[in-house]
Image (cartoon, grey):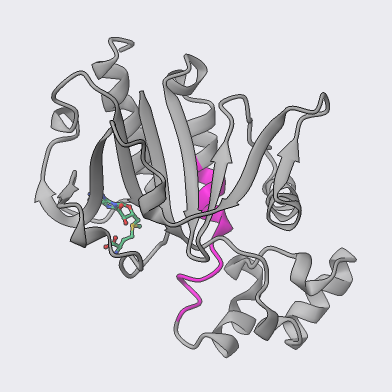
Amino acid sequence: MLQLNIIDSELELVPEEMCDDYQIRKIANTRNKRPEDMILDSNYMHGAIDRAFPGKSNRVGRPDIFYHLLNVTQDSILNRLGYLETMIHTKNDEIIKIDKETRIPKSYNRFIGLMEKLLKNGKVESPDGKILMHVEKGNWNSMNHNNYESILLSPKGAKVKPSNIFLRKTDFSVFIGGFSEGDFLSPVYKKLNPISIFDDELTIWTVGWEILSSMETLEGIR
Ligand SMILES: C[S@@+](CC[C@H](N)C(=O)[O-])C[C@H]1O[C@@H](n2cnc3c(N)ncnc32)[C@H](O)[C@@H]1O
């Protein structure tokens, strides 16, 4: 079993201090939404993010990262066969648990709508009432099952080939950063020694795919 934990993720609704920004108000008017009910998205709110958090507009407000990643994880063979549990921990210490049956909308706009509903209401249900995603409070340390072996991935870690990450047949809890630049906010290095799977920085969906494919090999699927 693989527990894939994306931590310190830059996924949040528009924070209070940005709700009065003219760019945010304009987008909210166009979308017929309240500013605080919209996902913070640097693709459209770059200027407003720069005004509120100078120099951070490439890191803050990156739901696009999770759109790409979740399309990879939810449709993977590992997930379809029931060997994958995916969780997203946000920088606001919320943990999003994603049911294996959750499929990600192909349209980015629909994905954003789904995430807004999730962060506002705390859950998303299927038409027949099954909870597909839900949010609870918790920090990165509360995510992993005690009996799972934990692995932290960072480009700064000791080099390991992807095929050598999982060397013994057991359950693993893998931690990946849910941000595009900078470093972990949570004190992960106090508990785990990071490993790197490539000499350069990779996107999280590429890292996620490498991890899934190594786990498929360990489980004898590949
Ligand atoms: C785009 S990176 C963010 C890079 C950031 N500068 C850092 O040092 O973590 C997002 C996450 O992908 C994972 N990652 C990216 N490149 C990696 C690599 N070469 N080896 C292992 N993990 C990597 C790490 O978990 C990282 O936190």
Label tally: 0
Give coordinates of residue 107: x percent, y percent: 70, 42
Horizontal side of residue 57 vs 134, given as left or right: left
Q: Which residues are magenta?
A: 56-69
Give coordinates of residue 32: x percent, y percent: 90, 66
Q: Quadrant of ligand 1?
A: bottom left
Query: Can the viewer see residue 48?
Result: yes
Give coordinates of residue 101: x percent, y percent: 62, 24
> As displayed, is residue 136 above or below residue 52?
above
Which quadrant of the structure image shows residue 102? top right
Q: Nearer the viewer, residue 75 or 195?
A: 195
Horizontal side of residue 90 vs 159, given as left or right: right
The quadrant of the rendering that contains the N terminus is: top left
Give coordinates of residue 165: x percent, y percent: 17, 33
Q: Residue at x 78, y 73 (%)?
A: 35
Whether 88 is among the magenta residues is: no
> As displayed, is residue 180 above or below residue 219?
below
The quadrant of the rendering that contains the C terminus is: top left
